[in-house]
Image (spheres, rainbow, N blue to C red):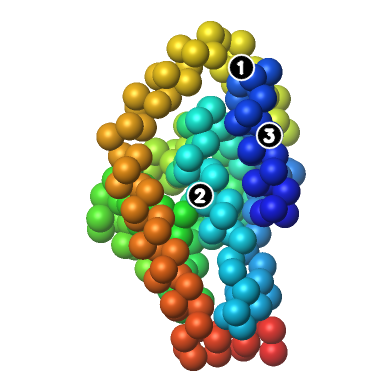
Amino acid sequence: MYQELCQHFDYAKNNKAINCILIRGNEKCFCAGNDLQDFIESAQGDSLVALDFVKILSEFNKPIIAAVAGDAVGIGTTLLLHCDMVIAANNAKFKLPFTQLGLCPEAGSSFLLTRLIGQNRAFELMVLGNTFSAEQALEYGIANQVCSPDELLSISEGIANTIANLPSDAVMTSRKLIRQASQSQLSQVIVNEGHEFSRLVNTPECKAILGKFFN
């Protein structure tokens, strides 16, 4: 899935006819989080292809809209921090279970979420890992709007189409200017997180937690 997402984002980036990206799941689940078996396999020497997706996501140059319903776990929440607008259904549930798995924040979230909601609240969400609601995501500034699940796709598609029909040069230039102050910091944070994540996934503690999950 990550490899396919990378291919789609690369295609969209280089296709002048595409002016906006919409990421969505269905009305019951946006993203259940990373495949834990993938973590176990990566601990045995394989690279985490998720990190390739994170790099492409962080460097993407066109607007990204996310339509979120149901579970948004781990990467399902952190990828939203790279989006330009997030529409959440009122059944959306967000969770960052990093430390419970013996891992650390990823996808630049240690920087992006802290900048968005402050150090103390970011610590609460990323270390305690408690589930939070669509209304809380709206309060935190992670979501732009909350709606019912049956309205989610039409509202999100409407916003994406509105953006796509605006003058593309003006939109992309505005987006670049909005993000320019944090881009270099973000790139370094993603590298730092990647190193620590790869280290932690190979620790005995993390391996034991993941192994217990499957047993």
Q: In the rendered image of this protein, does residue 163 appear above or below residue 33?
A: above
Determine the secondary structure under disc 3: helix
Determine the secondary structure under disc 2: helix
Residue 189 — which label? none
Q: CA distance from mark 2 to mark 3?
A: 15 Å
Q: Residue 169: x and y, percent?
A: 49, 13
Q: Please state, as top left, top right, bottom left or bottom right, where the N terminus lies in the image.
A: bottom right
Q: Disc 3 designates what residue?
A: 11
Disc 1 residue type (three-letter): Ala
Q: Of marks 1 and 2, which one's residue comes earlier in the chain?
A: 2
Q: CA distance from mark 3 to mark 1?
A: 16 Å
Q: Is residue 166 left or right of residue 119?
A: right
Numbered circles on residues, count: 3
The image quarter containing residue 81 is: top left
Q: Is residue 15 left or right of residue 171?
A: right
At x 44% / y 77%, what residue is drawn?
199
Q: Is residue 47 left or right of residue 126?
A: right
Residue 55 — which label? 2
Q: Which-is-in-front pick, marks 3 and 1?
A: 3
The image quarter containing residue 177 is: top left
- How many other residues sit within 10 Å of disc 2, few (<14), some (14-19) or many (≥20)? some
Q: Disc 1 designates what residue?
A: 164
Q: Is residue 131 left or right of residue 49?
A: left
